[in-house]
Image (cartoon, rainbow, N blue to C red):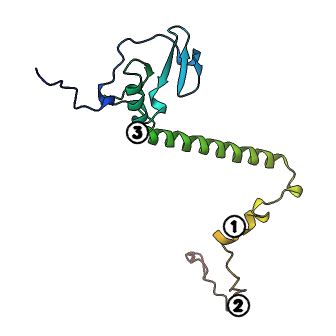
Amino acid sequence: MPANKNASLPILDRVRIASPCNMSWAEMTGDDRTRYCSACRKHVYNFASMTSKEIEALIIEKEGRLCGRLYRRADGTILTANCPVGLAAVRRKAVKLVAGVAATFFFAIQAFAYFVPASKRVRVRSLEPFATIVSRLSPTPPLTFGPIVGIIEYTPATTKPTSGNK
């Protein structure tokens, strides 16, 4: 009897959706990891929120009889929580979110400062802890120069002599 060609593959490489479901993940009750589908009365597991070891343990525990939500990349691999490509995407989203929040915050501060009369404005860099941070990042160099004293030399522009001079 020939050996099963899939026997040597890791469990995740052998996972496929045998019968796709039309139910919306958003309409199911539960959390990001597991939701309950009222149509088929089963728990649906989100593989993207689980590590590959957790998914394999779940498949073994359920003997392969479970509903799952998964994302398959173009190369055929399944996106998991510990996937380096997926983690990089999450990091990029987090950086964009933080940058957006920071930009919004600074825009709001600038917009607020625009409406404050100039006589009542306070420079943020003069307030603590910002004053200490600014002084450490860009210390003001001591004034080592004074007024410059010396003979002034002036070179006038050259003019063409006129032909009418006697």
Residue hosting label 2: 149
The furthest residue to the top: 39
32 or 72, which lies in front? 32
The local crowd at label 3, few if under 14, some if 14 to 19, many if 20 or more residues have their Cα within 10 Å, is: some
Residue 134 is marked as 1
- Which dot, 1 or 2, sits closer to the camera? 1
Tell me if 61 is positioned left or right of 152 in this view: left
Residue 130 drawn at (x, y percent): 73, 63
Residue 65 falls in image quadrant: top left
Helix or strand or loop: what does disc 1 sit on?
Answer: helix
Residues 110 and 65: in front is: 65
Residue shown at 38%/31% (left/top)?
A: 56
Which callout, 2 or 3, points at the residue further toward the start of the chain?
A: 3
Residue type at mark 1 is Val
Image quadrant in which you'd find residue 145:
bottom right
Q: Quadrant of the C terminus?
A: bottom right
Residue 63 position (above or below residue 111): above
Name the kind of residue labelled 3 in the image: Cys
- Residue 137 to residue 65: above or below: below
- The residue to which callout 3 is attached is 83
Rendering coords of residue 34 (x, y %): 53, 24
